[in-house]
Image (cartoon, rainbow, N blue to C red):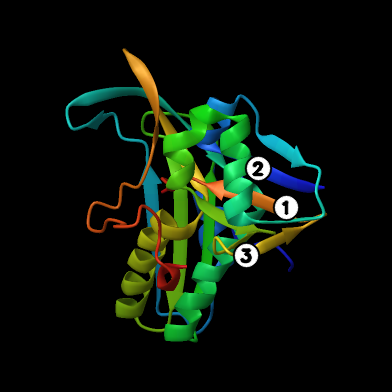
Amino acid sequence: MIKVLLFADLEERAGQRIVEIPTAEMNIADIRRYLLDKFPQLSASIRTAMPAINEEYAADQAVASSGDEVAFIPPVSGG
Amino acid sequence: MTEKNFVITREAIDIEAVVNKVADRNAGAINTFIGTVRELTNGKKTLYLKYDAYIPMAEKKLAQIGEEIQRDFPAAKVAITHRIGELAIADTAVVIAVSTPHRADAFTASRYAIERIKEIVPIWKKEHWEDGEEWIGDQLEKRSYPSGKPEKEDL
């Protein structure tokens, strides 16, 4: 199982912060597709979000494995 | 002392406590940056803000900023605390303290830290106005992401 975290407007649009994907492995691009399938309302914002695996920014081709924590990080606005 | 220098907190920030973390006998300067909640943005009145963060990654990225500063200024000491949750106008959202042997480096490093926070640290603010609310995206002003996200070298 891969744990996926959504933040800010992604979380709000999806109505949840945590999505669990019951799979052994999936790359980031496929996780995006999985989320879009489940939450079509994410379409605009998920494209501009940066993926991270286990708290480190990751590329679209990066592969997450069961037990990993994936996050989609919308453009940040701290400070 | 094992006190953390890079912190996300839900409490009001004790500015002096952040400054004290970088106090050093070899420092000739401590530069403190305090980011506060502004009421008017482009004429629009903010009632209050809400900040959220991916806390463990945000603290890691703040620590990375500290390491980047020490790469350029090995004698620098850095501490950053960012507050999340609901903040009122004029509240302190972030405190950055940098000490260095000479003041010019402390100014440079402090400026670098706040710009870098706006690039790589997973913290988001939601502005609440009289007529609505919105999560604010990239607001660096001086830099845009052509691909809609930070480039690899930015991370």
Mark 3 belongs to which subunit?
Answer: A
Whether residue B120 is visible, yes or no, is: yes
Residue underneath mark 3: A62
Q: Amino acid at mark 2?
A: Leu
Report which residue position mark 2 lands on: A5
Q: CA distance from mark 2 to mark 1?
A: 7 Å
Q: Which mark is first along the chain, 3 or 1?
A: 3
> Which mark is nearer the camera, 3 or 2?
3
Q: Residue at x 18, y 32 (%)?
A: B42
Quadrant hosting residue B48: top left
SS state under label 2: strand
Asked whether disc 1 touches disc 3, contact meaning CB atoms under 8 Å apart, the reply is: no
Q: Answer with mark 3 or mark 2, whichever residue precedes in sequence.
A: 2
Residue occupying image coordinates x 45% and y 73%:
B99
Between B53 and B11, the residue placed more toward the observer is B53
The number of numbered discs placed on residues in the rendered structure image is 3
- Other-residue count near label 2 (Cα within 10 Å), few / some / many at <14 / 14–19 / ≥20: many
Residue that badge 1 annotates? A69
Looking at the rendered structure, the kind of residue marked 3 is Ala
Contact (CB < 8 A) between labels 2 and 1?
yes
Q: Residue at x 44, y 38 (%)?
A: A45
Whole-number angstrom distance, CA of label 1 to CA of label 3? 13 Å
Q: In the picture, residue A29 is in which quadrant?
A: bottom right
- From the viewer's perspective, tell me whether residue B44 is left or right of residue A43: left
The answer to whether one can see residue B76 in this image is no
Relative depth, front residue between A27 and A77: A27
Q: Provide residue A5's location: percent of width, then percent of height.
A: 65, 42
Judging from the image, what secondary structure is the residue with disc 1 in? strand
Which residue occupies the extreme left position in the image?
B43
The amino acid beneath tag 1 is Glu
